Amino acid sequence: MESLYLLIPMSVVLVFLIGVIFWWSVRSGQFDDLEGPGYKVVADDDAPPARPEGESKADH
């Protein structure tokens, strides 16, 4: 029974802490776009990589 005096306040603090972390993550935009980054990985990039200035095809 005496362990409840410790466990109940600890659980209340833990629930409050989880709520604050969840609220912060929603407000900071962590859940805005869940599918976009996955599409960026598999998107086809048709443009060739840019060459540094001064470098030509003959240099290779």
Image: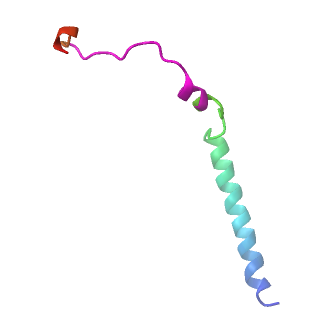
Tell me the quadrant of the picture where the N terminus can be found.
bottom right
Tell me the quadrant of the picture where the C terminus can be found.
top left
The kind of secondary structure the magenta stretch mainly shows is loop
Looking at the rendering, the stretch of residues picked out in magenta corresponds to 38-53
Indicate left or right for 55 with 51 as reference.
left
What residue is at 28 percent from the left and 15 percent from the top?
51
Indicate left or right for 43 with 19 as reference.
left
Depth order, front residue of 44/33: 44
Above/below status of 55 relative to 35: above
User: What colouring method underlies this structural image?
Assistant: rainbow
| Quarter of image, res 32 | top right
Indicate left or right for 21 with 41 as reference.
right
Magenta highlight on residue 40? yes
Above/below status of 12 relative to 21: below
Depth order, front residue of 55/53: 55
Q: Position of residue 16 (x, y in %)?
A: 71, 62
| Quarter of image, res 3 | bottom right
What residue is at 79 percent from the left and 83 percent from the top?
4
Q: Position of residue 39 (x, y in %)?
A: 60, 26
Depth order, front residue of 15/57: 57
Q: Residue furthest right?
A: 1
Magenta highlight on residue 50? yes
